[in-house]
Amino acid sequence: MTDLQIWVSVLEMGCFYGLIALGYLLVLQGAGFFNFALGPYATVAGMTTAWLVAEHEVPLWPAAFLGLAAVVALSVLTELVVVRRVQSRSSGSELPALVAIAAVLFMIEQSAGLAFGHQPLAGQSLLRTAPLEFGGVVVQPYAVLLIGVTVLVFAATALWIRYGRSGRLLRAVGDGEATARLLGLPVARVRLLAFAVSGVVAGVAGLLFAPKAGLQFDSGLGWTLNGFLALVVGGTRTVWGPLAGGLLLGAVQMFVPYYLGSEFVSYVVLGVALVFFAFRPEGIFVWRVRT
Amino acid sequence: MLRNASHRPPAGRATSQAARRAVRRAARKAIRRDVRRAVRRRGPRRIACLAALLSLAAACDSADPAARRAEVAGPAGEPIVIGMDEDSSGPGASYGVPAGRTVRDAVRDINRRGGVLGRPLKLVVENDASDPTKTPSVVRKLLGEGAKAVILSTGGGSVLQAKPVLQGARVPAFAPVAISEGAVTPPNADYVFMLGNPISDFTKVYCAAMKQAGYRRLGVMTDLSPTIVALNRILLPKLRACVDVVGVEQAELGSSDVTPQVARLKRHDPDAVFVSSVGGIYEILIQNKLAEQMPGLARYSLASIGNQPGFWKVANPRALDGLAFMGALVPGNPRAEALRGFLTRERGGRFEMTAYDAQAWDSVQLIKTAIERARSLDGNRLKQELEKLRGYRPAFGQSRLTLSFAPGKHIGADGLCGLALVEFGRGNRPGGMQHGYQPQCG
Amino acid sequence: MTVDRTRPAGALRRPPTAEAEAETEAGARAGAGRPAVGLPRAADRWPPLLGAAGLALVAAWAGGSAYHQDLAVLFAVYALIGLGMYVPFVMAGSLSMAYGAYAGIGAYAVLVAQVKLDAPFWLGWPAGCAVAVAVAVLLGLATARLSGFFLAAVTLLFGTAFQRWLVASEDLTGGASGMAAGAGPAVLGWHPGRGVLMAAGLLLVWAVAWLVDRLRRGAWGVTVRAAREVPLAVESCGVRTRALDLLALATGAAIASMGGALFATFQAGVTPETFTLDIVFLAVFMPLIGGLGTSWGAVVGALVVVETTVNLPVLDDSGKLVLTAVVLAVLLVAPNGLLGYLDRTRRRFAPGAVRGGRDGARG
């Protein structure tokens, strides 16, 4: 039954990476830009909540709400203060925006270390029931919540993009910002909305994943990279692509250590990245990779 | 370059620090109240603003350098500088920080009682995050600030790197939380001292306990922190000598999931599992998974997990049940009880004492004793006095334990009774001595 | 050149070539419009002299204090990693973030030579350079089609995988606890003291910064930078831009590996966590802080980094945070970095030179 237990872990990791990748997709649609700060956003949501509950005895749900609010504020600030200004003057080159977002990523990590300490914090689980058990396979309560909410978030996003007014605007801007501007669409507002929504998604991801293994101020960089990889693997054609990519990446990260040993994970992940970035750019995703 | 405002009157400094702490406490309370109120009112703008405030308060709270580099006040006279390399942010922080806190309390207590040779002790603290490449610089900095003795409250790998610097400067050092005898074996070991039993003593206890319980097949789960990797080099061969080690699985610090590793261990069908880890959230992750996947299997661990009360409550319910760890805090030791009383008074409320507190406390007392006997601050003289110490009764270990040092014997514990196998009971709390084998003195 | 003033330029924006030249030259250019390549000019003389004076000041500050010497060497190590990053970043416009790995290779080479092969430490220096260059070329070939975010992500993943490899290859690297050399470095039986090693390290920084600056403004540098701006045009002149990029990456990797080797020589030890991803981020920031106009910007940036993250007592743990805030401010407000800002201030008080600076745009 051990193998089935690993599948549970694959689902957990996959849902988490999928959510981060969805955050990327939203910003990519709205602002044509990969928000590398998403990983640290997720950390901040989880850490703020854990810290408020553990150190300041704030009740769990208000603490979680504050954690999410902090992340949305961070995400919106990233757009208003940094990305918009740097992009507007870099005339199409993505290097300035990349360096700027790297600085933002590093800054959020360091602030988190300063505010919440450099030691890992245990995440707070929003669901505190007994674990479920099916024929020897154990599913912890946080995993139930993580998987359930992920499906809900993806379904809601798909519906929003398809039928919601602002969702369709998002797609319109994503198809061509200059054209959208010419058509008089509220580009700036749509971009801001994309950042805010992606902030919520990343925050939810961090909040629900935190009880699994705790979090540290610098967990975010790894999450940024894995989420990005999930996005590239899954593709940007549909909203569900990131989830597929996340699950695939989760499977790699769980089965490689099971069959080969734990040191091979980072080599295989690097290999997957090289292969997908370099050889499968078309078809799977539509954003430009090559120069 | 001196970080510490040594020219300021120490008393004033202490009061201002206390005042600052009080203000912070009040502010935190006020903020907490406000958050509750605001949340009740559900004013989103207010909450956002409060969130910002809170993070600000947190920043002030943990960043106050004066609080971390605690200087302590007391008798007049030129202070005697004691240096401490404290891992307060790395993988060793889970033991470095509690030990460091007790060192501060011990220094403050000594100063309140008139200091050493009529002079106050002054503690200067630096952090190496248990990064062995940073440690030499950190120790040099402490020495540059005038440290006459050093406390290495950091990882075992870092202690190894501190040795040549201390040897070159001829300044004695205690490694209260180190358990690898590498800290006191040559080369460059003339000035480093340890208190408790080293890892080779641990393995004697584990082997005897497993033999008595009839366990033959042992699975090992380990993390990959430098401290633990260095420790495993001593630990694993000795375990292999007494049981059949059927599998060794590794997990990086910061892993999110150890299901694959545990599944691999499970395939080997062990009688018992040994977890070699720096502790903290890393070990909780492992213990949660072991309890979930192999319920009822006997588990052994190093000392860390038993000394980290903050982490017991974040483990899954009953995940630590039956886990045996190497304790050094044994019921019935009167000095431990006295120290518990003192520290509870100092810190108030829900203080839970650990062996780190006891060993940190004893380290400071031994340094004080050595300075008093040497009537000098010369490193060589201090070392000689330390090597003459016999029969010191420490706050850790069984009540009969004594510490003695000699040239060539820089590990204090006389006999195995600095150790005790302690078992977690229900509710993820240590339930007392493990039934079955227990180490004896002599 | 007036464009430059009315529209504050992004640090890394990609304007038309002539404008870019003028802008990046801003830090170094003092005299009137002279040809870019060839003849000596004030800009060639002053930065190396000022740099030498600055490094001498650092050495004097360190003096006999062992801890200050540690800091001075750390500064030299950071400066070399920053200079290594500067070459492909500024010249070829590619943000490779594998520099922690290159520095690690340099450091491990020195210790493997001493500990595993029982060879003199200095053999590790060229060996480390060679391995770093080989790795950089291989990685460059594997990522030749990637740019921007994709390149950054892959190189970060490479850094992670390399660190994991160091931990796993216990026989070669000593595993997670790393390696330490018993004795200090020796050259033919002579054991140079810590002060000598520190001075040598600072001298190395000076030499590399000077060379990189010459390189940047020499024919090769101009070609590489032109290839960044208008690859097709350069390609059509018969230059293979791919080879140029690889050469830039290899040069950078060699310089960064020397930074690692310097650390290992001085501290006689290294672990997989010595050169973490943190250092990679700091290395990206260093040229930005100092200013992209000249390689000396990376050196100034390294000084700022060491001062804020390690030395300044008031900043303590918040040093890196303050530093990042500085970087963002530089990106948003002063895209030419500290040196660029100083240079502009200087020129403002010397009207003749201002005209010279303006005329300096390539004609």
Image: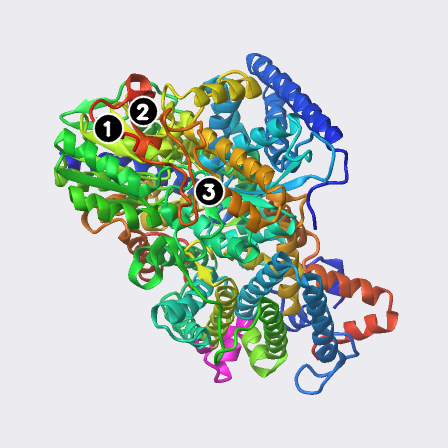
Going by the numbered disc 1, the residue's amino acid type is Ala
Q: Relative to residue C332, is residue B305 drawn left or right? A: left
- The Cα atoms of the two marked residues, 3 and 1, are separated by 33 Å
In the picture shown, does residue B101 fall above or below A283? above
Q: Chain of mark 1?
A: B
* Residue named by callout 1: B291
Q: In the image, what residue occupies the spot 39% across and 65% down?
A: C143
Q: Chain of mark 3?
A: B
**Marks 3 and 2 share the same chain:** yes
Q: Secondary structure at mark 1?
A: helix
Residue B273 visible, this orientation: yes
Q: Secondary structure at mark 2?
A: loop
Q: Secondary structure at mark 3?
A: loop
- The Cα atoms of the two marked residues, 2 and 1, are separated by 9 Å
Depth check: C277 or B354 in front? Answer: B354
Q: Which residues are magenta?
A: C227-243
Q: Residues within 10 Å of mark 2 (few under 14, many from 20)?
A: many
* Residue C46 percent coordinates (x, y): 75, 76
Q: Quadrant of residue C64?
A: bottom right
* Residue named by callout 3: B175
